[in-house]
């Protein structure tokens, strides 16, 4: 039977290599996890931006059409508000969010929203990256 003192000179080196491989695997998994979280946050911000852009464009087009039909600013902004609430109920319509140029009939809609992220929105130095602001302008329909 071979005892612990007869394992030979290479056994200690292999034990050291096993520790090194274990550390390498842990570091590699941490890097993959960080890249994964960054990808999820980036996708969330992009998805929020695209969704908000679509809601703002639809609302601007609706407001411009309603204004060109009746020349009523309040009715145009009310129609735009309904359009935004239908497309994205969590979008924020701040002060001055609906502006209509009475000379050209163009409507400008500004919407705000904070993307739901894993890390970006929770850190003070990256929180601004999660805040999305979209401004869309549309003229009256030519039809």
Image: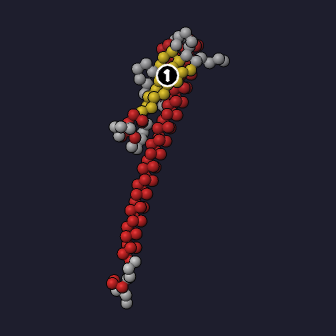
Residue at point 53%, 18% (across, down): 107
* Residue highlighted by disc 1: 109
Nearer the observer, 1 or 11: 11
Q: Residues within 10 Å of mark 1 (few under 14, many from 20)?
A: many
Residue 105: name its quadrant.
top right
Nearer the observer, 84 or 43: 43
Please say if 75 is above or below 25.
above
Nearer the observer, 126 or 97: 126
Please say if 83 is above or below 16.
above
Determine the secondary structure under disc 1: strand
Residue at point 38%, 38% (across, down): 126
Nearer the observer, 66 or 35: 35
Q: Position of residue 26 (x, y in %)?
A: 40, 60
Color style of the picture: secondary structure
Q: Can residue 32 be seen by looking at this rendering? A: yes
Q: Position of residue 76 (x, y in %)?
A: 51, 16
Q: Which residue is outermost to the bottom?
A: 1
Q: Position of residue 134 (x, y in %)?
A: 48, 28
Residue at point 39%, 34% (across, down): 128
Q: Quadrant of the N terminus?
A: bottom left
Q: Can residue 82 be seen by looking at this rendering? A: no
């Amino acid at each position: 039977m071979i005892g612990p003192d007869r394992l030979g000179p290479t056994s200690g080196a292999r034990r050291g290599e096993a520790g090194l491989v274990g550390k390498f695997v842990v570091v590699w998994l941490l890097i993959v996890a960080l890249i994964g979280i960054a990808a999820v946050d980036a996708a969330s911000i992009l998805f929020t931006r695209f969704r908000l852009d679509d809601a703002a464009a639809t609302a601007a087009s609706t407001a411009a059409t309603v204004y060109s039909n009746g020349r009523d600013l309040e009715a145009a902004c009310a129609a735009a508000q309904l359009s935004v609430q239908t497309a994205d109920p969590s979008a924020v319509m701040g002060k001055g969010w609906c502006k209509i140029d009475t000379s050209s009939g163009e409507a400008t809609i500004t919407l705000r929203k904070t993307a739901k992220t894993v890390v970006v929105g929770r850190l003070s130095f990256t929180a601004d990256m999660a805040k999305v602001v979209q401004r869309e302008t549309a003229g009256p329909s030519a039809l």
